[in-house]
Image (cartoon, rainbow, N blue to C red):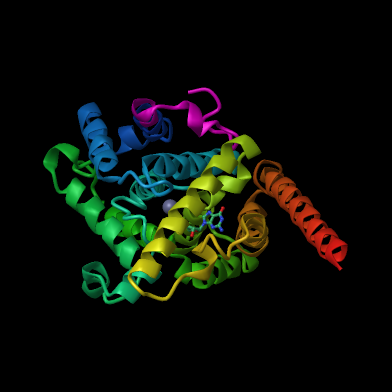
């Protein structure tokens, strides 16, 4: 499992079965298998059940699930959290990361709202996909052979935490999740305080969920292409169905490097900055690569602006 704890881990070199092996390893390494007394076949059956339910979308697929789980694991390791956070919390985090986009249809919450889909109606137009991912996870866990919580004493609490962590990945909740965590850090983070720890786990899963640009350019770049390919499919569908078109997804309107610059500056850097206040030496692993990516996009955007100005002035 070489480099598994490194943010630069090359996720593209793993096939579908190796990803399962690597996730199994994380459950073992963080002591979850032992603490929860998970039979070997149960963990495997659970992971295979989850993998089966990930759809084959360009972006929201099982490899994205793997990436998010691996980055959450990397954050745990690099911030040296494994002895500060309980094993139940670590297990809830891994499980939430594994399940956080299960059965994602490749269309976001805004599409579901505008199209008034059955899922939107079922979940009352609130965190539609995230509630669905948690419901699918519960369905998988309801199978005795796949229930990794079977021998856990406080399984209701663990399952509630898994649900809360999946819901925290809804970007509509971003401001609230950030404010709660920031306030806990400002007033003195307390690892013995359950709500402080939960606020940290929410930031970890959120950081991991949007972590592509923390990875080296060769690993990140195919993810960016895939994200915008999925966006493009959604915007084509919105046009076909005469729904409001999400402008940042429309390939005729979007400028990918500008969008990435905005995403790094507006979402990623503030969140990773807050995360690393708990262990400033971890900035080198997570914040420095983001500044490198930001610089790359800034140069690219500046070049494009110069080219446009040049083309414009040579026409007049
Ligand atoms: N413009 C970009 N948006 C990104 C990037 N990485 C993630 N995202 C957005 O965040 C959500 C994450 O939630 P998920 O649970 O759906 O994965 C994702 O859908 C994107 O909208 C990025 O690099 N650039
Ligand atoms: Zn995700």
Query: In this image, 74 relative to 217: left or right?
Result: left
Instruction: Kindly tell me whether residue 37 is visible in this rendering.
Output: no
The magenta segment is 1-19
Can you say whether 25 is above or below 179 in the image? above
Find residue 44 and report its image quarter.
Answer: top left
Magenta stretch containing residue 104, yes or no? no
Q: Is residue 10 above or below residue 291?
A: above
Query: Which of 190 and 162 lies nearest the eye of the viewer?
Result: 162
Q: Residue furthest left?
A: 144
Taking depth in this image into account, of 182 and 226 the one nearest to the observer is: 226
Residue 169 position in % (x across, y down): 43, 60
Q: Quadrant of residue 257?
A: bottom right
Residue 163 location, quadrant = bottom left
* Residue 145 locus on image (x, y percent): 14, 37
Please state if 280 lies on the left or on the right of 183 as rendered: right
* Residue at x-position 33% and y-position 49%: 99
Against 85, residue 10 (above or below) is: above
In reply to whether residue 13 is colored magenta, the answer given is yes
**Residue closest to the far top:** 2
- Residue 160's x, y, as percent? 30, 59
* Place of residue 239 in the rendered image (x, y in percent of width and height, measured from the top left): 40, 69
């Amino acid at each position: 499992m070489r480099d598994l704890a490194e943010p630069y881990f090359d996720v593209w070199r793993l096939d579908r079965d190796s990803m399962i092996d690597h996730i199994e390893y994380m459950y073992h390494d963080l002591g979850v298998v032992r603490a929860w007394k998970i039979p070997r076949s149960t963990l495997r059956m659970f992971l295979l059940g989850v993998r089966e339910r990930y759809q084959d979308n360009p972006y929201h697929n099982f490899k994205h699930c793997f990436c998010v789980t691996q980055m959450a694991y990397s954050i745990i390791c690099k911030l040296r959290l494994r002895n500060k956070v309980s094993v139940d919390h670590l297990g809830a985090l891994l499980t939430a990361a594994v399940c956080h986009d299960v059965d994602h249809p490749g269309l976001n919450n805004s599409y579901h709202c505008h199209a008034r889909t059955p899922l939107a109606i079922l979940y009352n137009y609130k965190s539609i996909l995230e509630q669905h991912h948690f419901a699918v996870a519960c369905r998988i866990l309801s199978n005795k052979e796949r229930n990794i919580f079977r021998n856990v004493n406080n399984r209701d609490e663990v399952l509630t935490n898994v649900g809360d962590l999946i819901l925290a990945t809804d970007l509509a909740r971003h401001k609230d999740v950030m404010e709660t965590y920031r306030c806990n850090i400002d007033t003195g983070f307390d690892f013995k305080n359950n709500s402080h720890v939960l606020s940290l786990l929410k930031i970890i899963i959120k950081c991991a969920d949007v972590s592509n640009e923390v990875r080296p350019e060769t690993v990140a770049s195919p993810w960016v292409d895939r994200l915008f390919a999925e966006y493009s499919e959604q915007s084509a569908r919105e046009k076909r169905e005469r729904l409001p078109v999400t402008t940042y997804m429309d390939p005729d309107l979007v400028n990918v490097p500008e969008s990435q610059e905005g995403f790094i500056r507006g979402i990623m850097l503030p969140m990773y900055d807050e995360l690393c206040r708990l262990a400033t030496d971890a900035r080198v692993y997570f914040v420095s690569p983001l500044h490198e990516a930001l610089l790359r996009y800034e140069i690219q955007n500046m070049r494009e602006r110069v080219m446009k100005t040049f083309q414009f002035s040579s026409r007049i």
